[in-house]
């Protein structure tokens, strides 16, 4: 379970402090598929960074399965990200000179997966998201946007994470491909009991998730 | 695939850029190696030339060279000053004189010849002019050189022991009227060991006959110093002192000390000084080579450093993603260090091979170009010799002989530099390469470690 309690984030800028997040509190149950919607600059990405242990809150706590991630050291947070969190980005962010298979293997390596079975697992993951064998050995530039996002999802699933954080996962895709990717995430949530938090501005997508949080000026307004 | 293989694979990401980096780095490594070889070879030659130069210092009355020139002999007081100078461990003193046919029963075995006649005419032109219109002069013969010495071996021009072909050497500490005579002079006068001749109105006994490879030398007479001083009425004075310095490291200081104490009354020269003059161009090459090593090392480090910084800046997002999905600083930094080291290893291997191939020709080229410059400068000085007669670097024109001939030999020796690649040089080159590689990769690695994934991903 993911529990966010009284989380605030303040950035000190030259023009004074900016309160990006203000006393945010919510819970996401295991296997739940939730969405966070909000306008640009509302604090969505900051919240995602804090949930993903990429940044630390100024106040409050984030607990994942009894682990307070804001109290982990930088190195521990990195290891934690590798094993417990899967990221799916709007621009896919695959490593360009690695093949689809190697991108997934890389995540397995960072997560400490045994070297001898990394390739087998990566192949299975890619097949599970619909990447065929001939596509697995292609570099990202030789894959379509939808295929790249599928590889990105396979990479996010590599280490059986506690939850997946997806930042505008369909933002760069056409509506048909976007729907397929959304359906894939939905299936993961339902069939594999994977907790998924999606940040999106697409209200249609948000409406199909189990719950939707709306964030305005750093505050959660709807749960 | 692990950190190492990813790092190596990344170097092929942009083959043209990687190739250019490797090539530039290889050239800088080749330059480093070549310059190290040149420097090492030149320094070895400098040491070799200095080692063969000996530790002797020659002190003559100012203006004297052999039996030419003028000036007053060195006095007892000056000799005392020389002997008491620090670092002088031994002295050999000589007094030279010319026996004219009026002073001896011997007939000179030398003839003036064309060269000597011109010199004689030049030196006696004023005398001849006073006799203009008079009777034709009788053609004299050259004088016989008599050398009084405390060490008969010092008479030998090449530094070797005097070769006495018959009889025995003389006791140079005595003041007996005894002498060694040159083989040519002995033959000319049909003299043998035990025979006598007259000189300075005294009867001199021949104790031995010597022979050198020098006809001028073989036409002379050697006596104990005290004997010649007595015969020529020049008690306690000498024309040349050869002082032996305790160490080659102290020669320059000793020369300076002697110049300070004897002032303008004496001309002081040393083989080490001559050697230093002859190797001065080599020292210039050594300095140039060192500057080349430093410049090439800086260039090499800059190439790797800037290339890797460019790579890190270009791939900030990739670094951020790797950190976001669990890549620790160690693994991410390790990958970039591997990438940098792969480039430098390729560059170093190519550079080493290139350096080995070009170090010989480059050393030869450096030495010959420097010598060309020196020869050109020396030629220029000779041309303007009259107007710069007080130049310390000016050389008298005419054929070299004795000390000057030795100097030319030193110079010739100094230009014969052979480039040699030793394990030490390779070790130094590898060390420099390693330092460059570490500098070139450590700083970009530091930039890599500072990349915060949240900042990179926030820019989406």
Image: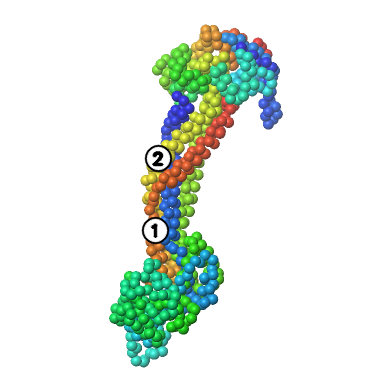
* Badge 1 and badge 2 in a common chain: yes
**Could one spot residue A136 in this view of the protein?**
yes
Q: Which residue is more in the foreground, A16 or B276?
A: B276
Q: Earlier in the sequence, mark 1 or mark 2?
A: 2
Q: Chain of mark 1?
A: B
Kindly identify which residue carries mark 2. Answer: B350
Q: Chain of mark 2?
A: B
Q: Is residue A86 above or below residue B403?
A: above
Question: Considering the image in quadrants, where does the C terminus of chain B appear?
Answer: top right
Q: Is residue B306 above or below residue B76?
A: above
Task: Assign a secondary structure to mark 2.
Answer: helix
Label 1 crowd (10 A; few <14 / some 14-19 / many >=20):
many
Label 2 crowd (10 A; few <14 / some 14-19 / many >=20):
some
In percent of width and height, residue B259 lies at: 53, 69
In percent of width and height, residue A23 lies at: 70, 18
Residue drawn at (54%, 70%) of the image: B84
Residue drawn at (64%, 21%) of the image: A70
Q: Which residue is more in the foreground, B438 or B298?
A: B438
Kindly identify which residue carries mark 1. Answer: B415
Q: Is residue B379 above or below residue B169?
A: above
Task: Assign a secondary structure to mark 1.
Answer: helix
Residue drawn at (40%, 87%) of the image: B201
**Could one spot residue A220 in this view of the protein?**
no
Contact? badges 1 and 2 (CB < 8 Å): no
Left or right side of A180 for B159: left
Question: Considering the image in quadrants, where does the N terminus of chain B appear?
Answer: top left
């Amino acid at each position: 379970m993911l529990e966010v309690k009284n989380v605030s984030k303040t950035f000190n800028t030259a023009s004074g402090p900016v309160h990006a997040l203000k006393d945010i509190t919510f819970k996401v149950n295991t296997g739940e598929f939730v969405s966070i919607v909000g306008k640009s600059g509302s604090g969505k990405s900051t919240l995602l960074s804090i949930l993903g242990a990429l940044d630390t809150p100024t106040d409050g706590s984030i607990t994942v399965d009894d682990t307070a991630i804001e109290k982990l050291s930088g190195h521990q947070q990195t290891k934690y990200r590798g094993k417990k969190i899967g990221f799916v980005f709007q621009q896919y962010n695959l490593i360009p000179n690695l093949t689809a298979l190697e991108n997934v293997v890389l995540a397995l390596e960072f997560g400490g997966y045994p070297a001898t079975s990394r390739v087998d697992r990566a192949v299975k993951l890619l097949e599970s998201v619909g990447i065929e064998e001939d596509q697995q050995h292609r570099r990202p530039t030789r894959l379509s946007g939808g295929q790249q996002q599928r590889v990105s999802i396979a990479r996010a699933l590599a280490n059986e994470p506690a939850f997946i954080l997806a930042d505008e996962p369909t933002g760069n895709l056409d509506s048909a491909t976007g729907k397929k990717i959304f359906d894939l995430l939905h299936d993961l949530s339902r069939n594999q009991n994977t907790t998924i938090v999606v940040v999106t501005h697409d209200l249609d997508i948000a409406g199909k998730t189990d719950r939707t949080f709306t964030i305005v000026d750093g505050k959660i307004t709807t749960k | 695939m692990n950190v190492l293989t990813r790092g190596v694979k990344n170097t092929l990401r942009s083959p043209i850029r990687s190739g250019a980096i490797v090539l530039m780095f290889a050239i800088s490594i080749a330059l480093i190696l070549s310059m190290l070889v040149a420097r090492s070879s030149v320094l070895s030659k400098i040491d070799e030339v200095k080692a063969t130069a000996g530790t002797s210092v020659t002190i003559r009355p100012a203006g004297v060279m052999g039996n030419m020139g003028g000036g007053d002999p060195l006095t007892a007081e000056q000799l005392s000053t020389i002997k008491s100078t620090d670092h002088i461990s031994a002295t050999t003193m000589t007094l030279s004189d010319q026996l004219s046919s009026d002073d001896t029963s011997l007939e000179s075995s030398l003839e003036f010849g064309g060269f000597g006649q011109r010199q004689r005419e030049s030196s006696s032109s004023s005398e001849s002019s006073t006799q203009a219109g008079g009777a034709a002069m009788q053609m004299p013969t050259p004088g016989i050189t008599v050398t009084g010495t405390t060490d008969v071996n010092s008479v030998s021009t090449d530094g070797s022991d005097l070769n006495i072909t018959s009889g025995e050497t003389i006791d140079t500490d005595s003041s007996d009227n005894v002498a060694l005579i040159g083989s040519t002079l002995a033959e000319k006068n049909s003299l043998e060991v035990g025979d006598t001749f007259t000189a300075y109105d005294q009867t001199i006994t021949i104790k031995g006959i010597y022979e050198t490879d020098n006809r001028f030398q073989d036409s002379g007479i050697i006596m104990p110093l005290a004997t010649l001083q007595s015969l020529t009425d020049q008690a306690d004075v000498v024309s040349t002192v050869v002082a032996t310095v305790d160490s080659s490291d102290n020669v320059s200081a000793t020369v300076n000390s002697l110049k300070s104490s004897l002032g303008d009354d004496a001309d002081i020269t040393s083989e080490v000084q001559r050697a230093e003059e002859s190797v001065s161009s080599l020292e210039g090459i050594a300095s140039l080579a060192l500057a080349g090593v430093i410049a090439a090392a800086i260039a090499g480090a800059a190439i790797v450093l800037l290339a890797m910084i460019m790579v890190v800046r270009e791939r900030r997002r990739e670094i951020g993603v790797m950190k976001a999905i669990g890549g620790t600083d160690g693994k991410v930094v390790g990958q970039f260090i591997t990438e940098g080291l792969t480039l430098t290893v390729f560059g170093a291997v190519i550079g080493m091979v290139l350096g080995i191939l070009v170090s010989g020709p480059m050393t030869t080229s450096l030495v010959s170009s420097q010598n060309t410059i020196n020869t050109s400068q020396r030629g220029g000085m000779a041309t303007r010799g009259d107007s710069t007669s007080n130049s310390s670097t000016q050389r008298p024109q005419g054929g070299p002989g004795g000390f000057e001939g030795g100097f030319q030999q030193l110079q010739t020796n100094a230009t014969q530099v052979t480039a040699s690649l030793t394990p030490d040089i390779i070790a130094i080159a590898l060390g420099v390469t390693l330092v460059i590689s570490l500098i070139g990769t450590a700083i970009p690695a530091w930039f890599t470690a500072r990349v915060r994934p949240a900042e990179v991903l926030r820019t989406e």
